Image (cartoon, helix red, strand yellow):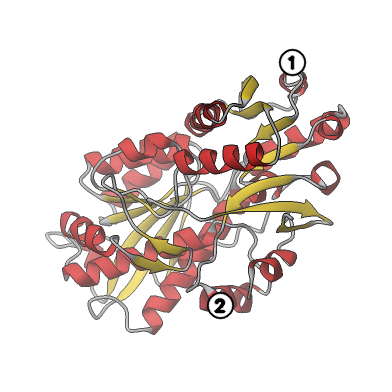
Amino acid sequence: MNLRTRLSTLAAVTTLALLSACSGQSATVGGSAKEPASGGNAAASGDTINLGAVIPLTGASATIGEDQRRGIELAVEKINANGGVLGKKINVIVEDSGGTAASALDAARKLTSANKVPVVIGEYSSGVTIPLGQFLQQQGLVHMNVGSSSPDVAKIGSLSFSTIGLDTIASKFTAEYLHRNGYRKAALIAPNNAYGSGVADTFKAAFEGLGGQVTNTVLYTEGQTDYRAELQRLRGGSPDVIVYSAYGQESKVLTSQAFELGLSKAVPWFAIYLSMCTADADPRAVEGQLGMDVNYIGPDGKSYEDAYKAKYNQAFATTFSGYAYDAVMMAAAAIEKAQSTEPQQIAAALKEIGKNYSGVTGQIAFDAQNQRSDQPYAVLKYTGGKLEPAN
């Protein structure tokens, strides 16, 4: 199925029912969690190999976190249907981060101390992923980033891997697209966190490197109910496009208030990660918007797409489930290759596998910092409640 056909059925979704967990609780994907056996390797206790995941099942990014969980679930089902890993079933213990670093770290401590997992997948927001990854690095455990794109993710350490491209690639793509289509003066608004500041810095460098001008950069504080003052600041310098990025629930407030102020009609808006920005938005407020997004299904992704539709009876809810799927599949392949659940051996195997891995999100090749070196993107348009390829 081509991109147009897939996206013509990808509706902007409201927050999904949280099927697997509530805040502060854990769920398992693939079986029951095993408590650590004294004196043994709890990651491979009995007939099960346990991995961990910390994702936002509640909070501003819950819609995306639930879709990440779906990707994990489908990967576990696929692996176990094909015989598991090292002759054992694989199981992923999923913890809810609540979208905060503190909760994510509490979840990670539980996974590492009680469940003794060698690999932890997560999170989504860079401001959560970075401290999570740093903690896992300190513990000598493998971290797999499946949704964050701040360039600072690359600095976490040698045991951290990314199945999704960072903003050094995404912002360059956005800048080149806008400049190629005649835009020369851009204002930008993004969250005041590791992700948002990374977007702002890399976009400004790329856009101004092409001869464009960033008229104003606004980094907003998350969790507010009123962003009108920040939105009004975007008018300064008379931009011909407003570039923005925001998590689902934050974007709902921002785009609704921009619509009320007439700002989204006066100046075109272009989203960085359009599916994230429109997932929970009022359709009226984002109708006609353009934006870039990860091109989330590669040449080998058709069977995954079919499995997703069959299990959940809908097209992809967001563009992010495939990156969690690829992370579980790569971790399992690394354990099999290493013939071990020891983190250092898994990491060494991941480096080998990551030289050229055919994932459902496309070819994955890790660079010297274990980051995805190339990330395919698409330019989409929100129209009639759907995301479709832009002309």
Residue 158 horizontal/vertical position (percent): 23, 44
Residue 46 horizontal/vertical position (percent): 23, 74
So how many labels did they put on this image? Answer: 2
Camera-side mark, 1 or 2: 1
**Mark 1 and 2 residues: CB-CB less than 8 Å, in contact?**
no
Examine the image and state in which quarter residue 106 appears.
top left
Where does label 2 land, which residue? 307
Residue 169 horizontal/vertical position (percent): 47, 43
Q: Amino acid at mark 1?
A: Gly
Residue 39 horizontal/vertical position (percent): 11, 59
- Relative placement, left or right, of 107 versus 302 is left
Disc ID at residue 236: 1
Q: Quadrant of the N terminus?
A: bottom right
| Mark 2 residue element | helix
Q: Which one is earlier in the sequence, the residue at label 1 or at label 2?
A: 1
Residue lying furthest left:
39
Q: Nearer the viewer, residue 279 or 269?
A: 269
Q: Quadrant of the C terminus?
A: bottom right
Label 2 crowd bin: few (<14), some (14–19), many (20+), radius 10 Å:
few
Vertical comparison of 264 with 354: above or below: above
CA gap between label 1 and label 2 equals: 48 Å
| Mark 1 residue element | loop
- Residue under the image location 71 percent in, 63 percent down: 10
- Residue under the image location 52 percent in, 58 percent down: 68
Q: Amino acid at mark 2?
A: Ala
- Relative placement, left or right, of 202 versus 188 is left
- Residue under the image location 44 percent in, 71 percent down: 75
Residue lying furthest bottom:
82
- Residue under the image location 75 percent in, 28 percent down: 240
Examine the image and state in which quarter residue 308 appears.
bottom right
